[in-house]
Image (cartoon, rainbow, N blue to C red):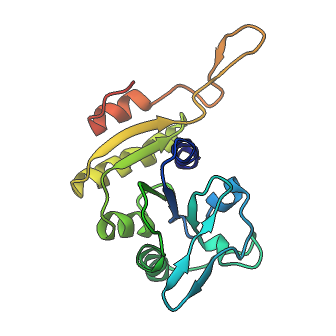
Protein backbone atom coordinates (compact mmCIF):
# COMPACT_ATOMS: atom_id res chain seq x y z
CA UNK A 1 0.00 0.00 0.00
CA UNK A 2 2.81 2.41 0.84
CA UNK A 3 4.48 1.89 -2.54
CA UNK A 4 1.17 2.30 -4.36
CA UNK A 5 0.30 5.56 -2.60
CA UNK A 6 3.81 6.93 -3.09
CA UNK A 7 3.71 5.93 -6.77
CA UNK A 8 0.35 7.66 -7.14
CA UNK A 9 1.64 10.85 -5.51
CA UNK A 10 4.69 10.91 -7.78
CA UNK A 11 2.58 10.26 -10.90
CA UNK A 12 0.28 13.13 -9.96
CA UNK A 13 3.40 15.33 -9.68
CA UNK A 14 4.20 14.51 -13.32
CA UNK A 15 6.76 11.75 -12.77
CA UNK A 16 6.82 8.66 -14.99
CA UNK A 17 6.27 5.78 -12.58
CA UNK A 18 6.18 2.00 -12.78
CA UNK A 19 5.42 -0.76 -10.29
CA UNK A 20 6.78 -4.28 -10.57
CA UNK A 21 4.60 -6.40 -8.30
CA UNK A 22 7.12 -8.99 -7.10
CA UNK A 23 4.67 -10.44 -4.60
CA UNK A 24 4.08 -13.26 -7.07
CA UNK A 25 1.81 -15.46 -4.96
CA UNK A 26 -0.06 -12.64 -3.20
CA UNK A 27 -0.18 -9.73 -5.66
CA UNK A 28 -2.22 -6.75 -4.51
CA UNK A 29 -1.15 -3.89 -6.78
CA UNK A 30 -3.69 -4.53 -9.59
CA UNK A 31 -6.57 -4.58 -7.08
CA UNK A 32 -5.38 -1.35 -5.45
CA UNK A 33 -5.48 0.41 -8.82
CA UNK A 34 -8.64 -1.27 -10.15
CA UNK A 35 -6.79 -3.07 -12.95
CA UNK A 36 -8.63 -6.13 -14.32
CA UNK A 37 -7.14 -9.62 -14.47
CA UNK A 38 -5.70 -10.43 -17.90
CA UNK A 39 -4.52 -6.83 -18.41
CA UNK A 40 -1.02 -7.51 -19.76
CA UNK A 41 -0.24 -7.64 -23.45
CA UNK A 42 2.93 -8.81 -25.09
CA UNK A 43 4.68 -9.86 -28.22
CA UNK A 44 8.09 -10.72 -29.57
CA UNK A 45 9.55 -7.39 -28.43
CA UNK A 46 8.37 -7.80 -24.83
CA UNK A 47 5.51 -7.26 -22.45
CA UNK A 48 3.51 -4.03 -22.29
CA UNK A 49 2.62 -3.11 -18.73
CA UNK A 50 -0.96 -2.29 -17.78
CA UNK A 51 -1.68 1.39 -17.21
CA UNK A 52 -3.56 2.81 -14.25
CA UNK A 53 -5.85 5.83 -14.61
CA UNK A 54 -2.88 7.97 -13.53
CA UNK A 55 -0.58 6.40 -16.19
CA UNK A 56 1.39 4.26 -13.72
CA UNK A 57 2.82 1.25 -15.54
CA UNK A 58 2.17 -2.05 -13.72
CA UNK A 59 3.23 -5.67 -14.16
CA UNK A 60 1.87 -8.36 -11.86
CA UNK A 61 0.99 -12.03 -11.96
CA UNK A 62 -2.64 -11.08 -11.35
CA UNK A 63 -2.58 -9.28 -14.69
CA UNK A 64 -1.68 -12.58 -16.37
CA UNK A 65 -4.58 -14.55 -14.89
CA UNK A 66 -8.15 -14.82 -16.19
CA UNK A 67 -9.61 -14.45 -12.69
CA UNK A 68 -8.04 -12.37 -9.91
CA UNK A 69 -8.64 -15.06 -7.28
CA UNK A 70 -6.80 -17.80 -9.19
CA UNK A 71 -3.92 -18.94 -6.96
CA UNK A 72 -0.33 -18.82 -8.14
CA UNK A 73 1.08 -22.04 -6.69
CA UNK A 74 4.74 -21.82 -7.63
CA UNK A 75 8.00 -22.79 -5.98
CA UNK A 76 10.98 -20.49 -5.53
CA UNK A 77 12.72 -21.05 -8.92
CA UNK A 78 9.53 -20.20 -10.84
CA UNK A 79 8.95 -17.12 -8.67
CA UNK A 80 12.52 -15.95 -9.25
CA UNK A 81 12.26 -16.54 -13.00
CA UNK A 82 9.01 -14.58 -13.19
CA UNK A 83 10.47 -11.60 -11.32
CA UNK A 84 13.50 -11.57 -13.62
CA UNK A 85 11.21 -11.81 -16.65
CA UNK A 86 9.06 -8.93 -15.37
CA UNK A 87 12.22 -6.84 -15.03
CA UNK A 88 13.98 -7.87 -18.26
CA UNK A 89 11.07 -8.40 -20.68
CA UNK A 90 8.73 -5.55 -19.76
CA UNK A 91 8.78 -2.55 -22.08
CA UNK A 92 8.95 0.02 -19.30
CA UNK A 93 10.02 2.96 -21.47
CA UNK A 94 11.63 5.92 -19.75
CA UNK A 95 10.67 5.93 -16.09
CA UNK A 96 11.65 8.35 -13.37
CA UNK A 97 10.90 5.77 -10.66
CA UNK A 98 10.26 2.02 -10.61
CA UNK A 99 8.87 0.60 -7.38
CA UNK A 100 9.24 -3.10 -6.66
CA UNK A 101 6.54 -4.35 -4.29
CA UNK A 102 7.72 -7.36 -2.28
CA UNK A 103 6.00 -9.79 0.05
CA UNK A 104 6.91 -9.56 3.75
CA UNK A 105 10.05 -11.25 4.98
CA UNK A 106 13.19 -12.66 3.41
CA UNK A 107 11.64 -14.94 0.78
CA UNK A 108 12.89 -16.05 -2.64
CA UNK A 109 11.18 -12.99 -4.11
CA UNK A 110 13.13 -10.60 -1.88
CA UNK A 111 16.43 -12.38 -2.50
CA UNK A 112 15.83 -12.35 -6.27
CA UNK A 113 15.07 -8.63 -6.32
CA UNK A 114 17.97 -7.64 -4.05
CA UNK A 115 20.47 -9.72 -6.02
CA UNK A 116 19.28 -9.17 -9.60
CA UNK A 117 17.79 -5.71 -9.98
CA UNK A 118 19.80 -2.47 -9.94
CA UNK A 119 18.36 -0.88 -6.82
CA UNK A 120 18.97 2.61 -5.50
CA UNK A 121 17.74 1.60 -2.09
CA UNK A 122 15.09 -0.10 0.00
CA UNK A 123 12.06 1.29 1.81
CA UNK A 124 10.87 -0.89 4.67
CA UNK A 125 7.20 -1.10 5.63
CA UNK A 126 5.95 -2.33 8.97
CA UNK A 127 2.94 -2.27 11.27
CA UNK A 128 2.93 -2.06 15.08
CA UNK A 129 2.41 -5.79 15.68
CA UNK A 130 5.33 -7.69 17.25
CA UNK A 131 5.36 -10.24 14.41
CA UNK A 132 5.57 -7.52 11.77
CA UNK A 133 8.46 -5.86 13.62
CA UNK A 134 10.30 -9.17 13.83
CA UNK A 135 9.88 -9.82 10.09
CA UNK A 136 11.08 -6.30 9.25
CA UNK A 137 14.11 -6.63 11.56
CA UNK A 138 15.08 -9.78 9.63
CA UNK A 139 14.66 -7.84 6.39
CA UNK A 140 16.91 -5.07 7.80
CA UNK A 141 19.65 -7.62 8.48
CA UNK A 142 19.27 -9.11 4.99
CA UNK A 143 19.47 -5.69 3.29
CA UNK A 144 22.50 -4.78 5.40
CA UNK A 145 24.25 -8.07 4.53
CA UNK A 146 23.67 -7.28 0.85
CA UNK A 147 25.09 -3.80 1.46
CA UNK A 148 22.13 -1.91 0.04
CA UNK A 149 21.05 1.46 1.42
CA UNK A 150 17.91 1.64 3.51
CA UNK A 151 16.14 4.82 2.44
CA UNK A 152 13.48 4.88 5.11
CA UNK A 153 10.82 3.11 7.13
CA UNK A 154 7.07 3.49 6.99
CA UNK A 155 4.78 2.25 9.72
CA UNK A 156 1.21 1.63 8.56
CA UNK A 157 -1.74 1.35 10.95
CA UNK A 158 0.14 3.09 13.76
CA UNK A 159 -2.92 4.71 15.29
CA UNK A 160 -6.07 6.57 14.44
CA UNK A 161 -7.25 9.83 15.90
CA UNK A 162 -10.77 9.60 17.30
CA UNK A 163 -12.90 12.11 15.38
CA UNK A 164 -14.88 13.04 18.48
CA UNK A 165 -12.05 13.54 20.97
CA UNK A 166 -8.88 13.72 18.90
CA UNK A 167 -7.34 11.04 21.14
CA UNK A 168 -4.93 8.65 19.45
CA UNK A 169 -5.79 4.97 19.63
CA UNK A 170 -3.13 2.32 18.96
CA UNK A 171 -5.44 -0.51 17.92
CA UNK A 172 -2.60 -2.80 16.83
CA UNK A 173 -0.37 -2.13 19.82
CA UNK A 174 2.57 0.15 20.51
CA UNK A 175 4.90 1.16 17.73
CA UNK A 176 8.24 -0.58 17.11
CA UNK A 177 9.38 1.85 14.46
CA UNK A 178 12.00 3.49 16.74
CA UNK A 179 13.82 0.21 17.38
CA UNK A 180 13.64 -0.75 13.69
CA UNK A 181 14.99 2.66 12.69
CA UNK A 182 17.85 2.31 15.17
CA UNK A 183 18.72 -1.13 13.81
CA UNK A 184 18.50 0.14 10.22
CA UNK A 185 20.48 3.27 11.11
CA UNK A 186 17.79 5.48 9.59
CA UNK A 187 16.53 8.75 11.03
CA UNK A 188 12.80 9.08 11.63
CA UNK A 189 10.91 12.20 10.63
Figure quadrant of residue 49: bottom right
> Left or right of 184: which side holds 3?
right
Placement of 52 over or under 180, stated as above or below? below
Q: Position of residue 36 (x, y in %)?
A: 75, 67
Q: Position of residue 135 (x, y in %)?
A: 44, 48
* Residue at screen point 50% across, 38% down: 130
* Residue at screen point 61% across, 64% down: 27
Q: Position of residue 145 (x, y in %)?
A: 23, 55
Figure quadrant of residue 150: top left
Closest to the observer, 91 or 169: 91
Residue farthest to the bottom? Answer: 44
Placement of 14 over or under 105, stated as above or below? above
Figure quadrant of residue 152: top left
> Left or right of 30: which side holds 181?
left
Residue farthest to the front? Answer: 14
- Which corner quadrant holds the C terminus? top left
* Residue at screen point 69% across, 10% down: 166
Amino acid sequence: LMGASTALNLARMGKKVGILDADITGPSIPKLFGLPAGGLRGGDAGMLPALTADKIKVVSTNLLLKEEDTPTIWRGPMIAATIRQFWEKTLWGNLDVLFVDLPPGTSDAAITVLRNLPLNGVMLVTTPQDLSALAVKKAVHMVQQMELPILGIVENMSYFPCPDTGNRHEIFGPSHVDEIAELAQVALS
